[in-house]
Amino acid sequence: MTAEASAPPLHGQADGGGRAGATASIGLGVLGALFFSASFIANRMMAVGGGAWEWTGALRFFFSLPIFLAIVGARGGVRPVLRALRADPLPWTLWSTVGFGLFYAPLCLAADLAPGWTVAATWQVTIVCGMLLAPLLYDDERGRIPGRAAALSLLILAGVFLGQSGGHGGTSAGMAGGVAVVLVAAVAYPVGNRRTMELAGTGLDTFQRLLAMSIGSLPFWIIVAAAGGVRAGAPTSGQLVASLVVAVSSGVIATSLFFAATHRVRRHPLRLAAVEATQAAEVVFVALLEPLFTATDPPGAVAWAGIAAIALGVVLYAFAGRPAPRR
């Protein structure tokens, strides 16, 4: 999953200015992408095992909430979160529901419809959506669409099309449906994320904002869980364990690794871009590992070409907005 690069300072870490430090930071980013990929694989495993997608989504956030509460509480930062929620309860509820609810629920539904590698590949479109939606969200410099980034968006979209049509057996109605709901998530995530960033301002750091969003989206997840209970009954023990693994691997380990990597190279734009581009490795990890854990067919040759196009687009995207190095 896409992580926030605007993490709070992590004390005691090296700057990452040297070549070894930059290599280590990229390594941390790739390792973070591996843990992020666990979410796509675990969601598909739960879907194949008969787990209701409603429980898959709700349980991840039910488990994540106490984890974020413990992290923020250990730093003495819970009170500012509660003050922010009390000051603007409706906006926090609305945009947290968009940013978390309408982001993750469609991804869980997509795991019912399409292989995890298809979901992971299509998910990279969120980078494109964030750029295209910027003029609607901001009226300052942040709303400008760079020409180079727009061109790279076409490369990513072409890769998604190839990935959808290039699996073994070609395009199916289920795969097309999975892609469609992922596109909903790809739009909802940047909208909710950017709106809650505006609400948080400078008063909340990243983990405090994640806690606020978890609390704000809680009513949505309670409704989703209730719907899952009515449709499919209680979650299985395997689904409980897998959801906890997703909450820890993606919500804590992967996020912490990515934050650490970006913080080490925060003063070096090109190295920061390289670390941010490691998120493209999620698609490769899912494509390679998913067949080992599920009965999912691996990507075909055309799909691998699409995955390569997406990965290349994401990597180039990370560098597109960076200033040229001084000579």
Image (cartoon, rainbow, N blue to C red):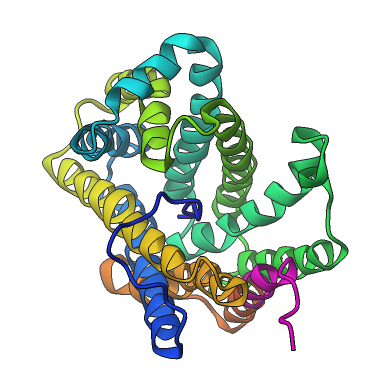
Stretch of the chain drawn in magenta: 312-327
In this view, the residue farthest toward the left is: 237
Q: Quadrant of residue 310?
A: bottom right
Against 114, residue 51 (above or below) is above
Q: Position of residue 258 (x, y in %)?
A: 40, 62
Against 311, residue 50 (above or below) is above
The answer to whether residue 11 is left or right of residue 37 is: left
Q: Where is residue 190 in the image (x, y as percent from the top left)?
A: 61, 42
Whether residue 263 is in magenta: the answer is: no
In this view, the residue farthest toward the right is: 147
Against 186, residue 234 (above or below) is above
- Residue closer to the observer: 194 or 293: 194
Identity of the residue drawn at 57% across and 47% down: 182
- Residue closer to the observer: 58 or 90: 90
Identity of the residue drawn at 56% across and 16% down: 91
Identity of the residue drawn at 27% across and 41% down: 51
Q: Say whether residue 227 is visible.
A: no
Quadrant for the N terminus, please.
Answer: bottom left
Q: Position of residue 254 (x, y in %)?
A: 33, 59
Quadrant for the C terminus, please.
Answer: bottom right
Against 180, residue 152 (above or below) is below
Identity of the residue drawn at 40% across and 68% down: 261
Q: How many marks?
A: 0
Q: Where is residue 274 in the image (x, y as percent from the top left)?
A: 55, 76
Q: Say whether residue 216 is visible.
A: yes
The answer to whether residue 260 is left or right of residue 146 is: left
